Image (spheres, coloured by chain):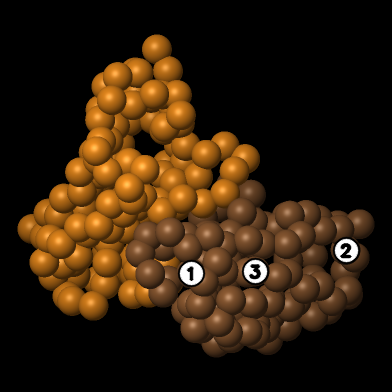
Chain colours: A brown, B orange
Amino acid sequence: DIQMTQSPSSLSASVGDRVTITCRASQDIYTSLAWYQQIPGRAPKVLLYAASRLESGIPFRFSGSGSGTDFTLTINSLQPEDFASYYCQQYDLVPYTFGQGTKLDIK
Amino acid sequence: QVQLQESGPGLVKPSQTLSLTCRVSGDSLRRGGYYWSWLRQHPGKGLEWIGYISYSGVTYYNSTLKSRMTLSLDTSNNQFSLRLNSVTAADTAVYYCARAGQYFDPWGQGTLVTVSS
């Protein structure tokens, strides 16, 4: 199975900050990576797919980059509604696997 | 707008069978190109993909649960189901159904299943 390693596992930031979350795959997954946001008590919601493509309706302050094994999610100008957990997920090979998550909270 | 909705018992006794159904609206299970998936999230933990079933009934199960699970499709009612046998407390989790082209979108709202006597 492909292992996905996210860092950091938790992150404190303030409204208006820029934050970056990284995700590393245990083998080359090309750009077969999605990022999800999960608000407590809610189902995850896809933010980006194909590593850098923004899902329809997602604000432009979210961006993604990377290919191969190393990926990043960047959130510019944090808004109050962005404080949530974030997960990366590879879909290059089954079984589909997720990173362990990054919890973003307010400093 | 595609919507998924899980249903099933919220409490299951140890050693019994967990059965959940996901009703799909706004899309047809008969339409190709998607894999109808189940995922779960243990309390306070990350996301685990359980398996999928395609429109033609092809299944893929995560190896960690393969020996205990069955996925099935009911195209007449546009729903798909998960059965997980011999449950233990370790199966206590929020269970989600989701549509997967490649990534998972959309998701159901999730249903908490607690395994306890």
Query: What x and y, as percent, mark residue A44?
Result: 53, 60
The secondary structure type at the circle numbered 3 is: strand
The secondary structure type at the circle numbered 2 is: strand
**Sequence-earlier tag: 3 or 1:** 3
Which chain's residue wears label 1?
A
Give the distance between the C-alpha atoms of the residues marked 1 and 2, in whole angstroms.
26 Å
Q: Quadrant of the C terminus of chain A?
A: bottom right
Q: Is residue A104 visible?
A: no
Which of these two is toward me, B106 or A63? A63
Q: Callout 1: 10 Å neighbours few (<14), some, many (20+)?
A: many
Q: Label 3: which residue? A: A23
> Can you tell which quarter of the image residue B115 is in?
top left
Amino acid at pointer 1: Gln
Q: Label 1: which residue? A: A90
Amino acid at pointer 2: Ala
Amino acid at pointer 3: Cys
Query: What x and y, as percent, mark residue B23?
Result: 26, 54
Residues under numbered marks 1 and 2 in contact, where contact means CB atoms less than 8 Å apart? no
Return the mark for residue A13: 2
Name above or below for residue B117 compared with residue A104: above
> Can you tell which quarter of the image residue B29 is in?
bottom left
Which chain's residue wears label 3?
A
Give the distance between the C-alpha atoms of the residues marked 3 and 1, in whole angstroms.
10 Å
Q: Answer left or right for B28 relative to B108.
A: left
Q: Quadrant of the N terminus of chain A?
A: bottom left
**Sequence-earlier tag: 1 or 2:** 2
Q: Answer left or right for A65 relative to A28.
A: right
